[in-house]
Structures are given as C-alpha cells and as structure tokens.
Image (cartoon, helix red, strand yellow):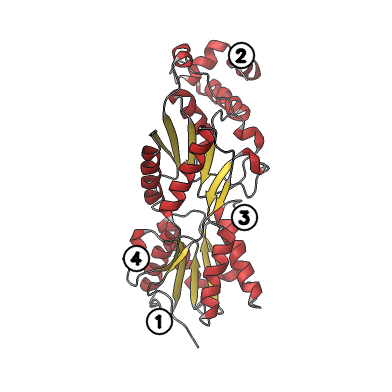
Amino acid sequence: MTIKDIARRASVSVSTVSRVLNNHPDVSEDVRAKVLAVVQEAHYVPNSSARDLVRPQSDAIGLVVRGVGNPFFTGVIHAIEDAIGQAGYTMVLHQISSREDEIRAGAELARSKRLRGLILLGGCFDYTQEQVAILNVPFVCCTYTNSFGNLQSGDYSSVTIDDQHEAFQAVQMLIERGHRKIAILLDSTADRSISQLRYVGYCKALESAGLTLDPELVAETGTFDMAASYIGTRKLMERRQDFTAVFAIADAMAVAAIRALHDGGRRVPEDCSVIAIDGIELSAYTIPALTTLVQPQEKLGERSVSILVDMIEGRAGNRHLQVDTSPRNGDSVRPIA
C-alpha cells in the first residue's frame, strides 16, 4: 500500500494525502476525515523519509504502553528498561491512551526510530494477521496474549499470566472461606479482552462449586477507572444487599470498591470481603490492606525482553510464556460460617 493507493481510494490527489498525513491546516475537515478513514481501513503506515531509509539501524528497542493511567504498568516498565540496558540496547518509550491502536503506533515508531524490536505493554487480545503485517520487526505482547484473534502461535510472542485460571483461583479462595454470594466488579463481560477472560474464570469457579451465576451480582463499569468502579460498587449495593464478597478483576478497581463499601456503611472484611488480581503497591496500603493475587511485574518485564533479544540476535523464534501469580494475604478477606 502506497500513498498513491491511498489517494486513489479516497479520490483525492497525492499532495492532498501528504498534507493530511503531515497535519497541514489547508485541508477541509471533510477531506481530512475521508483520507484518514481510508488510511485507518488500509492500516497504512507512511514510509520513512529518504534520509531515514539510508540511516543505519539503531540499537534501540521500542516500548509502546497502551493505557497511560494503569498503575500496574509502572513496575513492569522499570523492569523492561533495566533488562534492555543490561542486554546492551537502549529503550524508546512511547505511551498511548487505551483508545489508541498500539499496532499502528508501534509500526510508526519502529520506522521512525529504526528499531530492532518492539514490546507492546497492554493491548488488544484479538489481533488479525492483516493487522500485525504492518510490523516489520519482531515484537512481544507483554501482559496479554491473542486469546480472541486469528494469529498462529508462530506469528508473535507473549508473556502473561493465565487470566482465566487466576480469576478462578481468586474466586475459589472466597468459596473455600464459606462465601456463596460473590459479586464481580469488571469492565465488561464481553470485551474480548482481559475482563472477559477473568469473567469466564469467575463463572467457572462458581460452576465448579455448584453455585448458580446471579446476573444481579455482576457489576459492569465499562472501564477500569477508579471513579467508575466506585459508582459501579454503589449501584451494586443499591441492587443487592446480600452479597458477602466482591471479586474485583484489578487492584485499582478493588481499592475503589473498598471505599464505596465503606461509604455505603459496609465494613471490609466484617460485612464484605474483597479480593483482586494485580498486586500494585497502592493496594498494600489501603485500610484494610487488599488481599490480592500478585502478578510478577519484574518477571513479566524481564522475560519479555529476553524473548525479544533472542529473536533480534537470531537465537530463537517466537515463544509464549505464562507466569504464575502469588497470593498476598492482606486483611480484606475473612471466612464466614
């Protein structure tokens, strides 16, 4: 796909496409929208300049972070940066919002910075082969894998936990402590991403214990945002009063849930237990300290770099690694009769 192809599809001149791609102001909004729609549909990445094309490849590895407000990523980023330096490379960090396309951002970064490889920290779980075809360097998906896409295992690398299994484990911990009315706080039950995987684990844990899924105990927030999680928990409390535990699919959501329960007159853990997955530093300092399954941030980062460097230096091909969480026993869960 070239700029001429984009111009032909959009029924405009090549110079107009160039002005749009370079964000020149002398293009009408209608034409700009039409050109950008074709660019998006075709997954077009502009070619580097002639000067860039003759510049030698750098010793840099790119890190694209999708979801700049995710507190869990902080420790992973530090681990990746340290491991890249120890391997003799430099890191180029690029952060994007959770609404942006990490594949396109990575492709543009790789071309402009002449990168040797990419690590995508946070991203979609449903890539197609057409989408990743624009990446011309090896890449590793860190903290997620292609659970809902059509990629073959040899098309990419990943380092992640087993989200479904870890959610099963978290809910089972509550069940073993006598809880039967267990609510779940999540983004969406059908987001084709981490939320859906952890929801499936929640459902399987209930089924394994002979418990019936109650839709009224499912609180969907539409986001991982703490404010939305607080509101979601308060709405759950208005809808039902008999739940004895909440499984929040992320620590940040659990922190908001603890505050919402407190403001609604329910003590944690005396009136309601709370458990989550992630292990962010903040959740160890809540009152009470959160009981959670800790993702190994350092291992996630280090292993992602190790796999990528092996590919860059020709020692191995694409690989997939699952790492385990470890329980952090806070004070937010108690057994009930």
Any mark on residue 270, and which?
A: 1
Q: Which residue is mark 3?
A: 190
Q: SS at mark 3?
A: loop
Query: Does the residue at mark 2 contact the one at mark 4 (Cβ under 8 Å)?
Result: no
Q: Which residue is mark 4?
A: 284
Q: Amino acid at mark 4?
A: Ala
Q: Residue at x 48, y 37 (%)?
A: 309
Q: Give the distance between the C-alpha atoms of the residues marked 1 and 3, in whole angstroms.
A: 32 Å
Q: Give the distance between the C-alpha atoms of the residues marked 2 and 3, in whole angstroms.
A: 39 Å
Q: Which residue is mark 2?
A: 4
Q: Earlier in the sequence, mark 1 or mark 3?
A: 3
Q: Position of residue 208 (x, y in %)?
A: 65, 74
Q: Give the distance between the C-alpha atoms of the residues marked 4 and 1, in whole angstroms.
A: 18 Å
Question: Comparing marks 4 and 1, which lies closer to the viewer?
Answer: 4
Q: In this orientation, does residue 101 appear?
A: no
Q: In this orientation, does residue 255 appear?
A: yes
Q: Residue at x 53, y 67 (%)?
A: 184
Q: Position of residue 255 (x, y in %)?
A: 39, 64
